[in-house]
Image (cartoon, coloured by chain):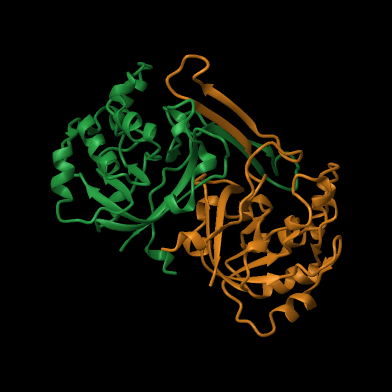
Chain colours: A green, B orange
Amino acid sequence: MPSAQFKDLTLPIENHFRWKVDREKISSFEAGDLFQITKIGWAVHGFTHIDAPKHILPQGSTSSEFALDQLMGFATVIDVSGVDEASPITAEMLENLTSSSVIEERILLKAAWDSRISPTEKAYWQRSPYLTRCAAEWLLDKRPKLVGFDFPQDYPIRGLLENEVPSIETMVTHDLLLRNGIPLLEYLCNMASLNSNRVELIALPLKILDSDGAPIRVIAKDV
Amino acid sequence: MPSAQFKDLTLPIENHFRWKVDREKISSFEAGDLFQITKIGWAVHGFTHIDAPKHILPQGSTSSEFALDQLMGFATVIDVSGVDEASPITAEMLENLTSSSVIEERILLKAAWDSRISPTEKAYWQRSPYLTRCAAEWLLDKRPKLVGFDFPQDYPIRGLLENEVPSIETMVTHDLLLRNGIPLLEYLCNMASLNSNRVELIALPLKILDSDGAPIRVIAKDV
């Protein structure tokens, strides 16, 4: 298995202005312990993670229902990296970018946004391209098993930095995809390292049951 | 990619008498929020996880150094499930069980111990088979990139339940393998679902950097 060809699409879990990470050594050499043991905690929607429908829908399915069949397999990469910052990604763009492609059961949108601005910068969140509602409808129409993004794909995410409460209708991928049972892979990174419009995706979330989401490690390779 | 053939070898992260899981909803529908958001925290050496050498060695390498090349690829499964409970697994046993095998770069010991007693029971921890120091030396001699176990492989782990401080020499896989730079996959489960002595292993830890270990999702399929 040529693991060397896999690229890591995962943000590190470390303190970030959007997400506080509680981290401490509960056993340490300095304290005379035989072992060093780290304890860590954070909200499961921080960093690279997967949303379960329960995140938006009280009766939605949870992380317990994630299946390997969703999480692993071929994915279509739609390269939207030509879009300007702070600009909409429309259904027409997605259609034009895939007109000659077979759409796989999993779809990743690649803006390579982290190649332009680091996710540790506020501008990454405030100046990101975003999806129109029609673009989210276009994605829903493909009935994928999983959709992933390497940029803050819903316009109101920028408002979350200022504690603005979004309207659900403008959280278009949450409202249209997640509400309809399609898990979202959020805050991917390093997608500029992928060159193909078709990849083999492996996305393994932590086994946290009955949750609205889970932290995840995501890797992919060109095929 | 035939994901359906992969078996999940991972324990769920949920409250356990050995490990406290801090879990709360920091946003909830009941409170009138638009989204449910779970926050979770625990020690990275609870449940199925990977140890980095830093766990035992102040100058040891950390989780930052885990490479996909270690974590993914073929693994030899040594089926030690014939051993009695509370009994030693010796170097001779490992040698006899593999005498006709090529040893892959990764080694998994399969006691299928969780098929006999649940990890939620104290007896799982107190009555487990364990490795002799010679058995750990045998494993070290193979210079694997990674070694995994589906039972508490070092005898003194049972004493940790009573807060007994072990001597490092008796923590044989920690003292011989981890100290020599070989990460340990601990507390695997469901290995009874594997039938082959050779598997394709995918072990993806969370991207927690500079740590003594990390929670992990582990899957494997017979080849």
Q: Is residue A132 visible?
A: no
Please give the count of numbered marks on the rendered protein: 0
Residue A90: horizontal and vertical position, in percent?
17, 36
Question: For residue A93, which quarter of the picture?
Answer: top left
At x 58%, y 47%, the residue is B214
Q: Nearer the viewer, residue A83 or B138?
A: A83
The correct choice, above or below, for A180 with respect to B156 in the image is above
Q: Is residue B61 visible?
A: yes
Residue B55: horizontal and vertical position, in percent?
66, 50
Residue A140: horizontal and vertical position, in percent?
29, 39
Residue B54: horizontal and vertical position, in percent?
63, 51
The correct choice, above or below, for A216 with respect to B28 in the image is below
Specify whether A82 is left or right of B199.
left
The correct choice, above or below, for B128 with respect to A30 in the image is below
Specify whether B141 is left or right of B218.
right
Q: Residue furthest top?
A: B32
At x 55%, y 62%, the residue is B220
